[in-house]
Structure formats: C-alpha cells, structure tokens
C-alpha cells in the first residue's frame, strides 16, 4: 500500500512539473496581448471615397455629393472614360447637386432642387448636364429625357496630375460663384448666380 501511495505521489509530482513547464513556455504578457489586437486585419481605404463639397453663396446653400475615384496611373479622359460618352461625374452612385435657391447658369434658370450631375467629356469641350434623376447607380438609369439643363464649357488642361476627383463650390461675389471639378490633368468650371 505504501508503495502504491509513493508511486501515485511520484506520478502526480511529475505531471505537475510538466504542466508548470508548459505554462512557462507560453507566457501571457502585455506585449502578447498588444500583438494579438494589432494582428486584426486593417481596414482597407476605399479606392473611391465618398465625399462632398458645399458652400453658402448669398442665401443659397449648394451641396455636391460624390465618390472620388483616383487616377492610379491610368489614362482617364479618352482612356478609362471614353470621349463623347455620358459619365456620372464620379464613382459608384451618380454625383448629385442640391441647391435651396434658384440659380442662373449659362443664362438659364436651374430651379431649387436636387439633380443628378453628368458630363460628356471631350478634348475641345465638355457638355454639363443637370438631370432630374439624381438617385441612380452610375449612369445605369440615365435618360436624356430627364435632363433639365445642358450647356458646354471648355476644359483647362494642366501638366500636374490631380490624383483624386475633386469638386469645389467657390463664392466669387455676394450672389455669384463657380462650380468646378478637377481630375487627372483636367479642370472644368462654370459660373452661376443666385
């Protein structure tokens, strides 16, 4: 019986030493905990982040909502975006412009409201389009019959590349301003009055 108890004690002692040895091999420290949280996958930045541009001009609040694609070493106009084809002037959903006051653009009246903003790029001139269907994916549902205003502007070409599409609403006087978009080497802008 004594031999059995001694043998049992030896086995128990040996197993305790083994468990202790395993615990020492895998210590839990602050560093290990920090590493485990930093090992979580980092969120990727979107290639075409959603953004907006807005300004007050007189008593008009003008808001442009768009997704901003990057050039990413591509030829954009005349390449990725063919000339003489309607483009939603952004990525993903169609770009939209909202004004709470009537605007005069190119001698025509744009009533207060929300509009899809489309363009037809070309080397010599761009067609600017305000369309009543502002809530659509890309140009999937674009219909020329829904256009409320069209006019042409001359693009300005730069040698510097603008990596991401950017819109600006700039106040020029108390009741007038400009709306511009720039991307790749192209700047297109047009004036408006409140």
Image (cartoon, grey):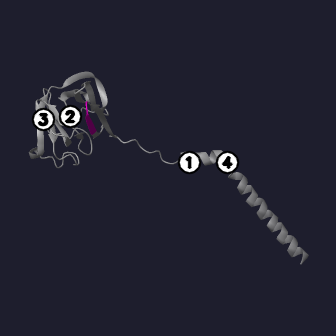
Please rate how many residues cluster around mark 3, counting C-alpha atoms within 10 Å: few if below 14, some from 14 to 19, many from 20: some
Of tags 4 and 2, which is closer to the observer?
A: 4
* Residue at (27, 38) in percent of width and height: 63
18 in relation to 68, above or below: below
Instruction: Tell me the number on the disc at residue 79.
Output: 2
Contact between marks 2 and 3 (CB within 8 A): the answer is no
Residue at the front extreme of this rendering: 59
Tell me what residue is drawn at x 61 percent, y 48 percent: 33
- The 10 Å Cα crowd at callout 4, few under 14, some 14 to 19, many 20 or more, is few
Q: Nearer the viewer, residue 46 or 107?
A: 107
Prevalent SS, magenta region: strand
Residue 122 image position (x, y, % from top left): 14, 31
Q: Report, in whole angstroms, how far the alpha carbon at label 4 lies from the one at label 2.
A: 55 Å
Compare marks 1 and 4 and give the one earlier in the sequence. 4
Quarter of the image with the N terminus is: bottom right
Q: Are marks 4 and 3 in contact (CB under 8 Å)?
A: no
Give SS at disc 4: loop
């Amino acid at each position: 019986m004594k031999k059995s108890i001694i043998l049992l004690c030896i086995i128990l002692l040996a197993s305790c030493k083994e468990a202790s040895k395993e615990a020492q091999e895998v210590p839990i420290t602050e560093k290990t905990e920090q590493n485990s949280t930093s090992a979580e996958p980092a969120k990727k930045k979107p290639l075409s982040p959603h953004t907006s541009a807005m300004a007050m001009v007189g008593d008009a609040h003008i808001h442009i909502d768009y997704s901003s694609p990057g050039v990413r070493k591509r030829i954009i106009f005349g390449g990725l975006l063919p000339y003489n084809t309607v483009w939603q002037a952004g990525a993903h959903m169609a770009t939209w412009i909202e004004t709470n006051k009537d605007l005069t653009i190119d001698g025509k009246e744009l009533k207060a409201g929300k509009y899809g903003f489309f363009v037809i790029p070309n080397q010599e001139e761009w067609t600017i389009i305000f369309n009543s269907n502002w809530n659509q994916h890309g140009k999937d549902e674009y219909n020329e019959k829904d256009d409320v205003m069209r006019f042409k502007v001359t693009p300005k070409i730069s040698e510097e590349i603008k990596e991401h599409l950017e819109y600006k609403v700039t106040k020029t006087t108390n009741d007038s301003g400009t709306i511009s978009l720039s991307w790749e080497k192209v700047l297109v802008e047009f004036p408006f009055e409140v």
